[in-house]
Image (spheres, grey):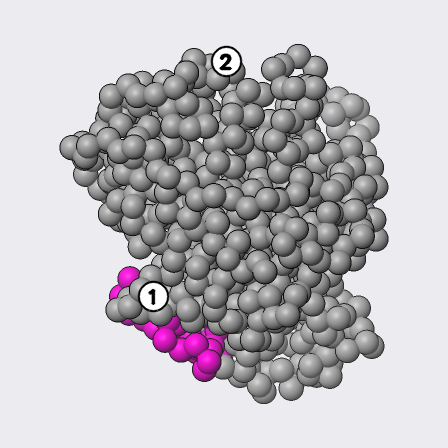
Amino acid sequence: MKRLPFTLIAISIFAVIGGARFFQRSNRTPLQPPELPQRPLVDQFGGSPRLPCRNKTGHFILAKIANRWWFCDPGGNAFISMSVGNLLTNGNPTKDCNGVNTYPIYAAKYGDAEFNWGWQTLRRMTAWGFNSVGQDSGPFVQPWETCPKCDWPQRRQPIRLPSLVEAKPAEYASINVAGLLAEPIKDEISGVNDNYSAWRGGALYDIFDPKLNLWWKKALASRPGLQRIRSNDPYILGIFTDDSDYFWGAGAGPDFASGHTSSNVAWMTLITSPVQTYIQSTPLEDKRFLYQQTEVYSKAQATNPTTPCSIANPCSLRDYLWQKYHGSISALNSAWRSNYTTFDTTGKSVTGELIGTTDGTTKVFALKLAHAEISPYSILIFAGGTAKAGDCPWFHRGCGTSKSNEGSIGSPAANFILQSSSSIDYLTGAVIISFVNPPAKGTAITANYIYGGWMAGGTGLMDEDGSHKSWVGTNPFCLEGADPNYPTYFACAGRGWGSNPVPNANPRLGADLDNWVPQMSAQYFKTMHDDLKAVSKLPYFGLDMLGAYGVPAYSKFLEGAAPYLDGAFVSLKYWQPPPIPGAFQSAYQYLTQYLGDVPFLTFSVISAQSDSSMSCYPISDANNMPDQARRGEMWYNTVKYLLTVNGRNGDIQFVGADWWSWQDFQHLNQGLVSIHDNAYDGHESVSGKVPCSAPLGQNSSCGGESGNYGDVIGPIARANALWYKFLP
C-alpha cells in the first residue's frame, strides 16, 4: 500500500498524540441516494465519439485539440480521466472507533475481499462517474486481471477501465529488487550529519549513479511485471516511475507555504558525505547494504566535462561548479566568501591496511589504524580480500551508538560481525572488530578508509559537511528569497504557521546551488524517459507526484523535468471561492509557467473528519471541510476551475483528476466509502441498517455507522461529468 502523503502522516500523529480524542454523533436524517448525472455514450476505453481525435497507435496518447489538451484513447476518441487512487481494501485487522475489526464486512457483503469485491467496487465507482483506476491500486480492479475460479464472467475483469501504472525504478534500485545490480544505489540523506536538522523521511537517491540507468534498462527488458509497458497495453493511461513520497526534491517547494517545505536537494548534496561504504537501514526497508563503489556520484563525480553542463547534458554538483568557475577554486571562493583549497577532497585514501591475520580461534581484533582523523562512511573491512563490513556513524539511525565521533562496524552478512561490540573512534582511529565466529586460520583482515577528508578536517569543496555556516547557512529549505513572480505565499518568511526561517546562505552560493537543481532533476527524468521510450510509446507522467501538501514542487525542479515529460501529475490543494486568498489560482499559474505546455493530472486529498467514520480522531488541517457536502463542493469547484481557466501558456492543460483514496484509512477521512464500506452518499453512511444504494441495491446491506454522515458522492458525480460539457 502507498505510504500516506507526508502531510497526512503528520496530521495523524498530531491527532493521536497532540489532540484530545472526541466522538461525534450526527442526528442528520438519512437521505435518499443521490441522483446521479446521466452519462453520454462512450467507447470501451471511456472516450467520447462526440470528439474524435487522431490516434492509430493502439494505445493512449495525449493530444491538443484547439487550445485544450485531452487523452486520446485507442479508439480515437477524446477522454478526460477521473480516477480513484489507492483502490484497495483495508488490511486485516482494521478497527473502527469502537475497536471492532471491520475487515469481515468485505466477505459478508461480497463473498470475498478480492475478485468479487473488485468487481462490485468498479461498479460503484463507475456509477459515480469515475472512469479510470488511479495509482497504487490493487490487482483485483486492474483491466487485465483474470481469475481461474471466481464469479467473473468469462473469468476476466468484467469492468475494464484504463489504469495508471507505477514502476518505481529508483526506489527498487536503492534496495536492488530482483538482484539486477551488483549493489544498490545510495541515499544521500543517509550521508548527511547533524548539521542537517530537518526531518529525514523519504530518500534523496544518488541519481547520477549509472546503476540507476542500468537497473531501469534491465527491468524494462526482463521483468514480467513490466511486459504490459513493453507491449504498449491499450488500457495503460500513462506511466509513473517513482513515488514522490520517497523522492526528496519532488515534494512541496518553497514558493507556497505548507508547513512541510522540502529541503533543497542541492544544499543537501553539498553537505552529504562524498562516499558511503555501508548502510544500516535504507529509508524504504530495514535492509543492510555494503557499497564497494563508494562514490556518491551526484556530489563527487569528477569528469571535468568539456560539454557544457545543461538540462540536456546534466552534470554532478562538483562538475557543474568546476565548469562555472572554469576550474578556479579561487573564483568560487571569491563568489561565496569561502576558503576551500580544491574542488575535490583533501582526504587521503588508504587501501588494504592490515588489521590482523586470524589464527582460527581469535574473535576480537582491537588496534589503532595508522592514520586519523578518519572520515565517517569511508571504512571498508575485508576478510581474505572480500569486502564484508563497513562503518555506521553516530548520526545515522540504528547504528548502536549516540556518542559523537564514534561509530559501529556492521555487515549485511548474517552472523559475521557483532555490531554491538564492534566500533570505530573516528578521532583516534581506534577500532574493535568482534566476529561472531573466528574466520578461518590465515585469513587476512584488512581495511580501506579515508583520513583528513569529510568531517575530518578536510578543506576541499567535497569535504563540505554543513559546518561552514557563514557561507553555507543553516536553512535547508530556502537558499534565496521569494520568486519575484510569486512572492505572496513564500514559505521562508520567518513568521507564523507554515513558514520557515528566512534564507541565510551566501547569496551567490544560494544562486549557484539553486541553478544546479534543474540539472539534478533533468538527470533523473532524462534517464527515465530515454530508457522508457526505447521500449515503449506510452505517455510518461514522471513522478507520482510533483509537489505535496497541495502545493507545487520547486520551480527549478519542474524546469529540469519539463523537457522529458509527456504529462505531469501535480499536487494542487483545491479551489475555494473569495474571500479565501488565491493560493490555488497562483499555484496553478506557477505550475503551468514552469512545466510549460504539458498536460497534467491533479492529485487531491479532501477530508471531512467530523462528518465521517473517522470522527473519533480529531484533525486540524486546511484540507479538512466541516461536512461531506462541503467536501464534495471543493472537488466540484476544483474540477470546474481546471476545466475552464487557461494556464499561463493560454491553454487548458488539465486532462484528469485523481481522488485519493477509495476508503478511509490510517484514522483519516480520505475515502469515498467509510471504514465500514458505506458510500458517503447520505444514505448508506448511517447508523441504522439500510439497503445499499445502487448499483449494489436492495440485496445488499449497508449502514451500521456510529452516526449519520452526509453526501459527498452527489457533488463528486456531478464534478466527474463536467468534462462532457466541453464535447461538441
Please give the range of residues in magenta.
478-506
Q: Amino acid at mark 2?
A: Gly
User: Which disc is residue 683 wearing?
Assistant: none
Residue visible at 33% across and 61% down?
576
Question: Does any portion of residue 222 appear in the rendered image?
Answer: yes
Q: Which quadrant holds residue 634?
A: bottom left
Give neighbour class at mark 1: few <14, some 14-19, many 20+ (Cα, 10 Å): many
Image disc number at residue 499: 1
- Measuring from the top left, give residue 686's x and y in whole percent: 27, 28
Callout in the foreground (1, 2): 2
Q: In the depicted view, which residue is nearer to us: 323 or 278?
A: 323
Label whose residue precedes the other's in the sequence (1 or 2): 2
Q: Quadrant of residue 218?
A: top right
The residue sitting at 48% across, 49% down in the picture is 721
Count of marks placed on residues = 2
Work out how far the residue at label 1 is from the one at label 2, CA to CA, in angstroms. 50 Å
Q: At which x and y percent is residue 642?
A: 48, 62
